[in-house]
Amino acid sequence: MAVFAFHQLEPFAGKSTTIRRPREFAYFSYDDEHVLHPLSDESLSYYYPPFFNTPGVRHPPVDLSAGFQTFKQRDDNVDEHLDALLDTLQAHEERELERLQCEHGEGDGRLEHVRVKTDVVTWRGMVTKILTAAFDDFNEFEMNATCFQGTIFIEENHSNKTAQKNSQNNQRPRPGQAPQEMMQYWGYKFETLSVLPRPWAEVSRDAIESREHAIVNNHAQYCSVVRTNIGTTSLVIAGEVDCVLGSKPRSPEDPIPWLELKTSADLQDNSPRELVKFERKLLRYWAQSFLLGVPSIAVGFRTPDGFVTRILELSTQKIPTQVKQGRWTWDGNVSINFTAAFLDLLKRTVTGDGVWRIRRVKGQKVIEILKVEESGTGNIVKDSFKKHRERLRALEISAALGK
């Protein structure tokens, strides 16, 4: 078992390690029935804020609880592993293979570039847990990891995730606090009120103004797949993005103006306790957006009973500086250096056959990496993806021998 201890954070202080700007190279959509569509942007949404305190427009208060009874909620008790991400990687590589074979033939040496080579493949949520761990004592998690063809694949341990969710939902809300299910709904409702299915110019005024009556459905998702580097580790990360501000640029080299949507209880006062609480939320907001290269975040502040009070737009890049000028409850450079050091340990530990568990217990200043299966890849890497990758590897070898 390998142990990553962080009782002291001084070793991670100072200027942040080298990082590479996340760049999207693939994407996928889930439709309204949560059916996967690799390399499709059909569920991409466009930001258009709800009518709120608009001069010259009389509009009732925005009630985030409206429509809760008709909420079309996805069943997240199903363990989806990394399947959607792996299916999309396979579709991307098959498209590249077809293009190269059409242009240069079977024996072309450039076939070695078809396979996406990286140290780690995982969901954005897994790296977020590591990136925030140094400053979040409430952060507990379990992940499963395996190594295939030199790449580490990491998924969430679904049984642990389900147990945590059930524990949260079974907790009695504090006096004056809404149930957990309702507060989760508020986030989806705010998203429904804030996005359009097509660019603004292509949407009718009626459709824009009727968003408050639309049935909230969290089945549909647009997920971005990016390449990035943290320190010496290269990563392929996938995660849902809420919407784009304007439109996606045509050049894949240009940054995309993504925008993340969040809801938060409005600050009751500017007391140190309230500010510390909000800064801790900002840690997660920043980490999630930083990892996918999302430059902006729109926060819908609300009352305890779910009425929007104001909307604040934040720059992801500026959040760490704002925290330093406030209560300084966390440090972005420390988080990045911490993550880079952990990933270095992970690469030294997860090698060869088998399955490992990555675990942190709430309140403890250690992350454990322990082997739980001596062979195979568990259910982390699906068989169809392994067969696809083995075929690519055979083509690479054949092309190399034919030189």
Image (cartoon, rainbow, N blue to C red):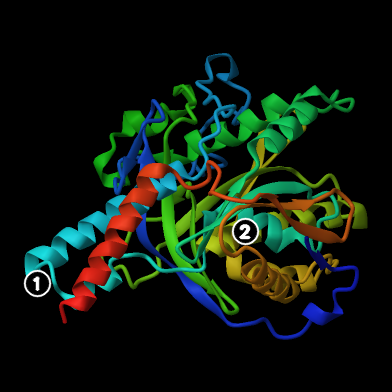
Q: Is residue 319 above or below residue 48?
A: below
Instruction: Provide residue 374's location: percent of width, then percent of height.
Output: 64, 51
The answer to whether residue 57 is seen in the rendering is no
Q: Residues within 10 Å of mark 2 (few under 14, many from 20)?
A: some
Say which element carries label 2. Answer: helix
Instruction: Identify which residue is drawn at 28% across, 38% down.
Output: 203
Instruction: Provide residue 296's location: percent of width, then percent of height.
Output: 53, 60
Q: Amino acid at mark 1?
A: His
In the shown orientation, is residue 221 left or right of residue 98?
Answer: right
> Which quarter of the rendered picture does the N terminus lie within?
bottom right
Q: Residue furthest top?
A: 69
- Tag in front: 2 or 1: 1
Instruction: Identify which residue is drawn at 63% across, 71% down.
Output: 318
Instruction: Identify which residue is drawn at 45% across, 63% down.
Output: 149
In the shown orientation, is residue 172 left or right of residue 225?
Answer: right
Front-most of residues 165 and 60: 165
Instruction: Provide residue 135's location: percent of width, then percent of height.
Output: 81, 62
Say which element carries label 1. Answer: helix
Q: Which residue is mark 2?
A: 127
Q: Amino acid at mark 2?
A: Val
In the shown orientation, is residue 269 left or right of residue 83?
Answer: right
Q: Is residue 343 above or below residue 74?
A: below
Q: Is residue 272 above or below residue 57?
A: below
Front-most of residues 77 and 33: 77
Q: Which residue is mark 1?
A: 104
Front-most of residues 19 and 154: 154
